[in-house]
Image (cartoon, rainbow, N blue to C red):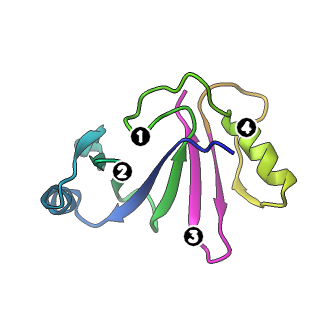
């Protein structure tokens, strides 16, 4: 199962303080918009998202169709196909991608310990 680029989406209290902290760890801006309270940062192949006021807790994130540099992959498994496979394997969906659409879409699931997982396809 190809889930795409992996990152950890962190809920932060002050995005500017968090950005400064992670820069000291060697992370650099990869994308996002700090004026909208979200920022994606990268250190080698490690990716984190900083999100202020958007989520209640940290989320594991996968992006089908993207590599770790947010570049499009030629071949990938569509989010709706991933959702279908997971449902067939008995995974319960918290939110579901609309099966009648194409392109961008997402779903969320939760692991046995309550950790949320977002599978978010941007194209």
- Residue under numbered circle 2: 47
For this view, does 86 lie left or right of residue 104?
Answer: right
Asked if marks 2 and 1 touch (Cβ < 8 Å), the reply is yes
Asked if marks 3 and 2 touch (Cβ < 8 Å), the reply is no
Residue 77 percent across, percent down from the top left: 67, 34
- Residue under numbered circle 1: 68
State the separation of the CA atoms marked 3 and 2: 18 Å
Q: Is residue 88 magenta?
A: no
Instruction: Pick whichever, 97 or 53, lies toward us.
Output: 97
Which residue shows up at 56% across the image and 42% down it? 120
- Residue under numbered circle 4: 80
Crowdedness near tag 3: few (<14), some (14–19) or many (≥20) residues, C-alpha within 10 Å: few
State the separation of the CA atoms marked 1 and 4: 21 Å
- Residue under numbered circle 3: 115
| Dot placed on the residue nearer the N-terminal end, 1 or 3 | 1
Asked if marks 1 and 3 touch (Cβ < 8 Å), the reply is no
Asked if marks 1 and 4 touch (Cβ < 8 Å), the reply is no
| Dot placed on the residue nearer the N-terminal end, 2 or 1 | 2
Residue bounds of the magenta highlight: 106-123
Instruction: Pick whichever, 108 or 65, lies toward us.
Output: 65
Which residue shows up at 74% across the image and 45% down it? 83
Residue 108 percent across, percent down from the top left: 63, 54
């Amino acid at each position: 199962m190809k889930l795409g680029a992996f990152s950890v989406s962190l809920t932060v209290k002050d995005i500017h303080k968090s950005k400064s902290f992670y820069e000291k760890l060697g992370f650099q801006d990869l994308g996002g918009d700090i004026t909208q309270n979200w920022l994606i940062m990268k250190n080698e192949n490690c990716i984190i998202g900083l999100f202020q006021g958007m989520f209640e807790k940290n989320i594991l994130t996968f992006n089908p169709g993207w590599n770790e540099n947010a570049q499009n992959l030629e071949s990938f498994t569509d989010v709706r196909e991933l959702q279908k496979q997971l449902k067939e394997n008995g995974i319960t969906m918290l939110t579901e991608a609309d099966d009648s659409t194409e392109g961008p879409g997402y779903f969320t699931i939760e692991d046995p310990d309550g950790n949320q997982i977002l599978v978010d396809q941007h194209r």
